Amino acid sequence: MERDIMEVLLSEEQIKARIDELGKELSAEYAGKDPVVVGVLKGVVVFYADMIRRITVPCQTDFMWISSYEGSNSTGNMVVKRDISCDIKGRHVLILEDIYDTGNSLDFTYRHLLSKEPASLKICTLLDKPSRRKPGITLQPDYVGFEVPNAFVVGYGLDFNEHYRNLPYVGILKPEAYN
Ligand code: 5GP
Ligand code: MG
């Protein structure tokens, strides 16, 4: 697994330090608001587990699972495979995501949750690849862990063909590993 990685982009220590910072900001933002923290499966699981443990105020957890239609990658044709299980009308909602790439997934998730009339809806993404944003997508994440260059990254929850999610850091995959 390790030998398929060309470069470690974010070490375990860097990720941990940034999550500590975000935890302080999110704890201040959501003090007294009992937010619902919605994780977007599956890439977010590792970040989610670490992030909520740095939020020191009461919060509720939930998950949703979205995917693009058969065989398409980032085409914008998204479906909800599994919706959140609680009523968020009038609640403060924070979306946690692994990566904001073209923006299709988060844009879809955001609009889906907004239609449920939350009191507020904000986004925290571990990674942001602004150079990849699809024209017309104007949504800005409220909290960003790290900006990353335009390369395919894996680890810390992010996969290639469902592999590499268990790497403890974020790395760039060697092109040979795609083949
Ligand atoms: P979007 O293009 O809709 O912003 O991102 C769609 C999804 O593609 C992300 O939630 C993530 O699961 C996946 N994705 C985008 N960029 C990368 C990347 O560099 N590495 C991995 N492993 N997944 C990515
Ligand atoms: Mg994702």
Image (tube, helix red, strand yellow):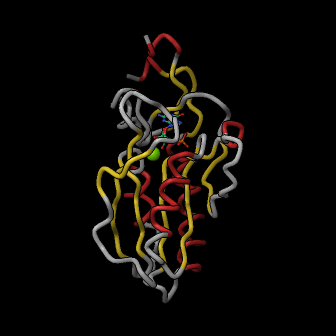
Give the total number of marks visible in the rendering.
0
In percent of width and height, residue 119 lies at 51, 82
Which residue occupies the foreground of this view, 137 or 27? 137
Q: Is residue 140 left or right of residue 104?
A: right
**In the picture shown, does residue 41 fall above or below 86?**
above
Dividing the picture into quadrants, the one containing residue 158 is top left
Residue at far bottom of view: 32
In percent of width and height, residue 120 lies at 55, 77
Which residue occupies the foreground of this view, 61 or 132? 132
In percent of width and height, residue 162 lies at 33, 31
Dividing the picture into quadrants, the one containing residue 10 is top right
Residue at image point 36% right, 32% down:
70
Residue at image point 52% right, 35% down:
75
Quadrant showing the N terminus: top left
Residue at image point 44% right, 30% down:
72
Which residue occupies the foreground of this view, 166 or 104? 104
Quadrant showing the C terminus: top left
**In the picture shown, does residue 115 fall above or below 11?**
below
Q: Is residue 66 left or right of residue 11?
A: left
**In the picture shown, does residue 123 fall above or below 98?**
below
Residue at image point 63% right, 48% down:
146
